[in-house]
């Protein structure tokens, strides 16, 4: 899943590509398995795969370069959240990755596109527009580079970084298959977030791997949602919920509905009641789970997060019809860890 004129990168190479390269070099056949097992099974940087002779590691590093160069790396004060702003080898495009750690798990939040064309008004990535799709290697490399910097095993991957994953379906799904088949992640530990690309959601329902679906809803009715999520004009809430129910029925998993809570915009008790009524009646397997996200500030949107008390009141009201409601604790605020923020800050400082 890369342009024909783009050199193969380290994590863009398929096993067959690696076997062909090593075959041309007249290396023993077992070398390809050693490389693959080192990169994916052991999750090691190439230079740390000491079962390979040093000259071979050096030759592979030159022939299969990394796709991403770390332009900026920031770690939160609690040292549990790290964010990378990468520049791609292909064209210098900027993308972001976030590693979020706890005692129980380590989660890599990866980008699927450089920028985003969805144009959600409150999102830093959407405000910047779309540069291009990422290829499979650029997506997979984000997870492995995060793993190399992580003292524990990366156990979960969420496609909640820059971009709309289902608008870049082929490379994203190929990356999911690599993460599952070669990195050993359970499909249940992989979450794909969408703003409501209905054809992609229906396609997801036909796949063999039962990944978790997260739908960015952000409003309980079409009139309000259309002001926040322009794609709602094309795929209104009823269609999005129908497609989400298809995914839930296909993989037997509960769908999460993301809801960015914005003071004075979508955080009233009337909004909470409408959201609870909407999702309380939703027929998806396991019922609906709403994840409330207090708004992360961006320079291109004047909104702000409600007070914690107001968010709690919203959660209690929305939960009355039997909907599971949780409030996400924002991570890495001190390092601009929300989607698109670090890139936006870097561009402002250099522009």
Image: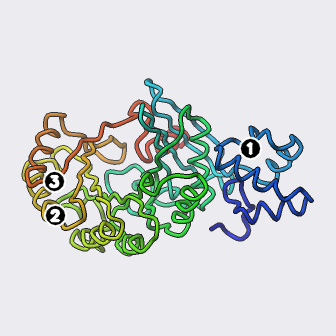
Question: What residue is rendered at 47% in x and 26% in y?
Answer: 79
Q: CA distance from mark 2 to mark 1?
A: 50 Å
Among the 4 quarters of the image, the one containing residue 230: bottom left
Q: Which mark is residue 323?
A: 3
Q: Earlier in the sequence, mark 2 or mark 3?
A: 2
Would you name the residue on which mark 1 appears?
46
Looking at the picture, how far across and down is residue 272, in whole percent? 12, 51
Q: CA distance from mark 2 to mark 3?
A: 17 Å
Give SS at disc 1.
Answer: helix
Q: Which residue is mark 2?
A: 221
Decide: few, some or many residues near mark 3? Use Cα within 10 Å; few <14, some 14-19, many ≥20. many
| Residue 232 screen position, x and y as percent | 27, 68
Residue 255 in percent (x, y) is at 29, 59
Residue beneath the point at 14% across and 34% down: 309
Residue at screen point 55% across, 55% down: 179
Residue 192 image label: none
Q: Is residue 74 above or below residue 139?
A: above
Q: In the rendered view, tell whether residue 213 sits above or below residue 158.
A: below
Looking at the picture, tell me which residue is in the foreground, 325 or 28: 28
Q: What is the residue that sits farthest to the right in this orientation?
A: 26
Q: Quadrant of the N terminus?
A: bottom right
């Amino acid at each position: 899943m890369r342009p024909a004129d783009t050199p193969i990168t380290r994590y863009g190479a398929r096993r067959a590509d690696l076997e062909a390269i090593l075959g041309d070099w007249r290396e023993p056949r077992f070398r390809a398995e050693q490389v693959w097992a080192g990169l994916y099974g052991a999750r090691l940087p190439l230079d740390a795969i000491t079962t390979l002779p040093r000259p071979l590691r050096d030759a592979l590093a030159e022939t299969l370069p990394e796709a991403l160069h770390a332009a900026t790396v920031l770690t939160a004060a609690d040292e549990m959240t790290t964010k990378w702003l990468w520049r791609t080898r292909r064209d210098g495009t900027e993308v972001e990755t976030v590693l979020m750690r706890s005692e129980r798990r380590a989660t890599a939040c990866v980008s699927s596109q450089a920028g985003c064309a969805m144009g959600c008004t409150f999102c830093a990535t959407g405000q910047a527009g779309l540069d291009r799709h990422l290829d499979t290697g650029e997506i997979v490399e984000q997870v492995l580079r995060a793993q190399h910097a992580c003292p524990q095993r990366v156990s979960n991957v969420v496609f909640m970084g820059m971009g709309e994953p289902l608008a870049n379906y082929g490379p994203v799904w190929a990356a999911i298959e690599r993460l599952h088949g070669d990195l050993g992640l359970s499909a249940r530990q992989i979450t794909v977030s969408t703003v409501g690309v209905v054809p992609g959601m229906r396609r997801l329902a036909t796949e063999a791997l039962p990944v978790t679906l997260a739908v960015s809803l952000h409003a309980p009715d079409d009139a309000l949602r259309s002001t926040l999520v322009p794609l709602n004009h094309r795929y209104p809430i009823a269609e999005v919920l129908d497609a989400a129910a298809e995914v839930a029925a296909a993989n037997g998993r509960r769908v999460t509905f993301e809801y960015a809570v914005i003071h004075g915009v979508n955080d009233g008790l009337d909004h909470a009641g409408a959201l609870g009524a909407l999702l309380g009646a939703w027929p998806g397997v396991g019922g609906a789970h709403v994840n409330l996200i207090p708004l992360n500030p961006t320079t291109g949107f004047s909104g702000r997060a409600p007070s914690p008390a107001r968010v709690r009141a919203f959660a209690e009201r929305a939960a009355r019809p039997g909907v599971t409601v949780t409030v996400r604790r924002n991570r890495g605020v001190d390092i601009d860890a929300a989607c698109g923020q670090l890139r936006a800050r870097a561009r402002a400082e250099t522009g």
